[in-house]
Image: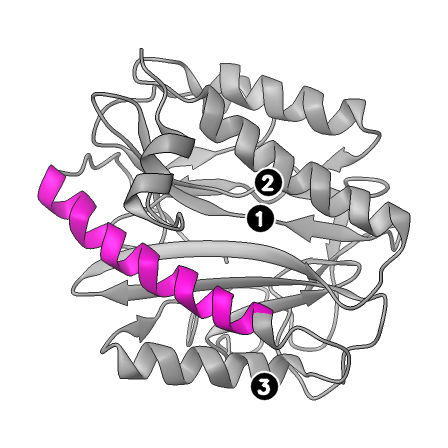
Amino acid sequence: MTSAATSRVVLKSAREIELMRAAGLLVRSILDAIEKIARPGATTNEMNAVADRMIREAGATALFLGVEHPSAKNPFPASICASLNEEVVHGIPNDRPLVEGDIVSIDCGVRLKGYCGDHARTFAIGEVSPEANRLLEVTSGALDLAIREMRPGLAWSKVARRMQTYVQDAGFGVVRNYVGHGIGREMHEEPKVPNYVDPDGDFRLTPGLVVAIEPMVTAGSAATRQVGRDGWAVVTRDGSLAAHFEHTVAVTDKGVRVLTGASDKAAARDGENES
């Protein structure tokens, strides 16, 4: 989900990062629950209902619901983005039953006790094609690579270069029209976090920085376009498949912490790199 970002980078305190961890755990639990029903015959509206219920029960708010965009006729109507097959981002949930071979990217964001968490995964529906499987592996692999490479003081461009090379060496495209972002009290803060080398978009990984890293990868051309009367869904221009994975990640003095990771122990083990 994209929107206007605040104009400056806001570093977070240890207390704020703990609050963001709570939001991250909630959004992770929502995607865990959605994954359990990501089967042929399910609908993305059913997935959205799961998210609605869990957000409400936690006393949180859905970040995407009601967001406005200049190209869209109406505010975004759901708590999740559900992007199917050639849709890259911003797909609106609907009642179309998922079928064997589909892939669906689910992006969810919440605000809990004033702080935000943002997380996305792409699910295979039943048995999918070898190309689709490889696309999911490479896209999630690009996110894992970024987290492994991150460390305090490093320029983001060095991480982004590794991500871009990894994806392109696999024969896939790196979407450039949509990128990751800073996150905190607001869903979208500075800096912008590209998944490719952008000389105009570099920044340093400073302790206290929290970012949402979200590679969006295509099986064909990286070019995209908006479709539909709603003005929300973004698809690949050539109709090729697209995948999307995202974690909210905090830079600390020791390394990085994956706030949407499975557990604190796993996040520290998987995400921290000593400088």
Return the residue at label 1. Answer: 245
Return the residue at label 3. Answer: 46
Residue 185 shows in the view: no
221 or 21: which is nearer to us? 21
Return the disc, 3 or 1, that comes first in the chain's sequence. 3
Q: Position of residue 93 (x, y in %)?
A: 62, 78
Q: Would you say 173 lies left or right of 261 here?
A: right
> What segment carries the magenta color?
14-35
Asked whether disc 3 touches disc 1, contact meaning CB atoms under 8 Å apart, the reply is no
Main SS, magenta residues:
helix
In whole angstroms, how far apart are the C-alphas of marks 3 and 2?
26 Å
161 or 150: which is nearer to us? 150
21 drawn magenta: yes
Return the residue at label 2. Answer: 215
Q: Colour scheme of this structure image?
A: one colour
Return the disc, 3 or 2, that comes first in the chain's sequence. 3
